[in-house]
Image (cartoon, rainbow, N blue to C red):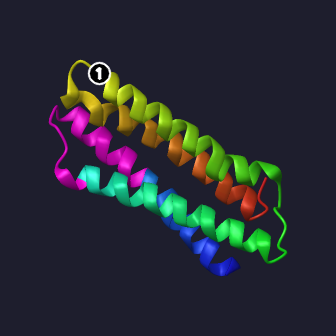
Amino acid sequence: MVTVHKYIGFVIVGGWGLFFLWGGVFFLIKREPTQWFWRLLAVLQSILVLQLAAGLTLLGLGHRLPSALHFFYGSVFPAIVLVIAHVMARGLEEKSDAWKVFAVAGFFLFGLTLRALTTGLGLP
């Protein structure tokens, strides 16, 4: 289960990096992203919940967190960023700009989940 949790972590970090870069490319070429952008967002949010469940299962099985920061960077802070992004996107006058909010959120989610991965791997 530890190995599964670790590999899901790599997928999450890579996914948020791809999501952020994808949004950046569409911003530079001044076009709206395709439906695949939104699908990737949905998949990444779902995988984040799956990763939280895997981590809680590990805790239940007696494994200990390498650092409390691992939990905060991997679940609490990303949840806060996603809630803020959803609230901001809903509040926009131009609904077509919602993807920009999530692309910026993707940048922060990439950084947060990368930090969660490094703390989980015991890196400084």
Give the side of residue 15 with respect to residue 76, left or right: left
| Foreground of the two, 33 or 38 | 38
Callout 1: SS: loop
Majority secondary structure of magenta residues: helix
> Residue 47 vs residue 18: left or right?
right
109 vs 64: above or below: above
Quadrant of the image occupied by residue 98 = top left
Residue 10 position within the rendered picture, expressed as x and y whole percent measured from the top left: 55, 66
State the residue at coordinates (22%, 39%). Answer: 26
Residue under the image location 35 percent in, 55 percent down: 42
Residue found 57% across the figure and 37% down from its top: 80
27 drawn magenta: yes
Q: How crowded is mark 1: few (under 14 residues within 10 Å), some or many (20 or more)?
A: few
Write down the region rendered in magenta: 17-36
Up the image or down, 80 lies above or below 22; here it is above
Q: Quadrant of residue 55?
A: bottom right
Q: What residue is shown at x 58% (from left), y 65% (from top)?
A: 51
Say which amino acid is labelled 1. Answer: Leu
Picture layout, residue 10 above or below residue 85: below
For label 1, the residue is 92
Query: Is residue 81 rendered magenta in the image?
Result: no
Quadrant in the picture for the N terminus: bottom right
Query: Is 105 placed left or right of 91 in the picture?
Result: right
Q: Where is residue 30 in the image (x, y as percent from the top left)?
A: 16, 31
Q: Is 9 or 46 nearer to us in this picture?
A: 46
**Residue 87 percent location from the top left of the image:** 41, 29
* Front-lying residue, 8 or 123: 8
